[in-house]
Image (cartoon, rainbow, N blue to C red):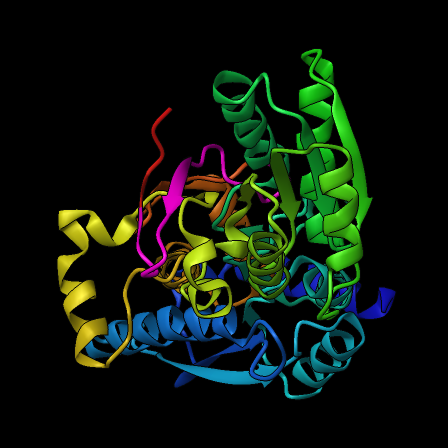
Amino acid sequence: MQTKRHLSGLLLAAALSGAANCALAVETIRIALPGPVTGSVTQYGDMVRAGAQLAIERINQAGGVRGAQLEGVVYDDACDPKQAVAVANKIVNDGIRFVVGHVCSSSTQPASDIYEDEGILMVTPSATAPGITTRDFQLVFRTIGLDNLQGPISARYILEHHKDATIAVLHDKQQYGEGIAGEVKKTLEKSGLKVTLYEGLNAGDKDYSSLISKLKRANVDFVYFGGYHPEMGLLLRQSKQAGLHATFMGPEGVGNTEISAIAGDASEGMLTVLPRDFEKDPKNQELVDALKAKGINPSGIFIMLAYSAVDVIAQAIGKADSSEPEAVAQALRTYSFETPTGTLSYDAKGDLTSFDFAVYKWHKDGSKSPAQP
């Protein structure tokens, strides 16, 4: 692996010393699109692929990147860390140099180890765990904010509007869910608000009645859950059936229309923290129309973020005048980029210098509206 990184460094030196003035020699630039094609959170993979493929299509229609066409290559990691490692190695063997994904934090982190070692640039539009970008990597970027930003936003909303509630913080024992639940708990307790119950559940279980009974015995009337929509949907439905009258809140991982299919009427009033509604920005109307023409709901939370992930790669290749990942990474850290999700610029870690999350109230028909006190 060290040899490959050394060779990558030599390639970067060559690119910066002379190749910057040359046109790209490749006819096609392949971008891997790894994420869940199968499994319980395929909806999030669908969103990422929809946004990324639309960006690839539109960039190609506009002439490509320095004359080169883009090609998206889909891989299924099922949001499973072990499968993600296998997928990452397949991407290496396939000779692909750019990745938009992975989708889940638990898959993104081990896969990014491989990409960094092998000189592959990755931009994830959805993985929010802070630890992904705290390892002094040079080739890992995101187009979304972090759990340690989103968690405190949730906690501040609770402090402002539910400070007298009896609060439970739950999580799914996975990197994303437990990480963001921990941020909520930490912020609440730092502000002097007691968390009555902090507990993990097993993702994939179908019966949470014993946990709900524990919540009832503790007189809990506000539940924050760190995790994804399949578990949150069951918690909502089974809590209502058991007579637990509590307000539920979760991160962007629960903000999926599928939760209304799982929870039914019980999803009404759920609170969730999401990226702002990029599909409602007038400048994105053409993209919204293109998605609708394909039968795709443009409100999917990761669609525009995935579009922007492809967009910044393409723009950075153009600014670097090179398709070498190290040169592209340098361009990402040097310039700012106009995208459907705003003007994006990066810090040394590969994180955005700013990102907006907001609190929404979910409705049983699958729609959402800004949360009110």
Residue 265: x %, y % from top left:
41, 58
The residue sitting at 19% across, 64% down in the picture is 288
Quadrant in the rendering for residue 202 = bottom right
Is 363 a magenta residue? Answer: yes
Q: Quadrant of the N terminus?
A: bottom right
Figure check: 146 above or below 202: above
Q: Quadrant of the C terminus?
A: top left
The answer to whether residue 136 is visible is no
Is 67 a magenta residue? Answer: no
Figure check: 334 above or below 206: above
Q: Nearer the viewer, residue 134 or 336?
A: 134
Figure check: 58 above or below 222: below
Q: Count numbered badges in the picture.
A: 0
Dominant secondary-structure state across the stretch colored magenta: loop
Figure check: 130 above or below 120: above
Residue 337: x %, y % from top left:
35, 46
The residue sitting at 73% across, 60% down in the picture is 208
Residue at far right of view: 2
Quadrant in the rendering for residue 159 = top right
The answer to whether residue 271 is visible is yes
Residue at far top of view: 192
Residue 147: x %, y % from top left:
62, 40
The residue sitting at 60% across, 59% down in the picture is 228
Q: Nearer the viewer, residue 316 or 12?
A: 316
Q: Nearer the viewer, residue 189 or 346?
A: 189
Residue 20: x %, y % from top left:
44, 59
Magenta stretch in the rendered image: 348-368
Residue 177 as seen in the image, left or right of residue 311: right
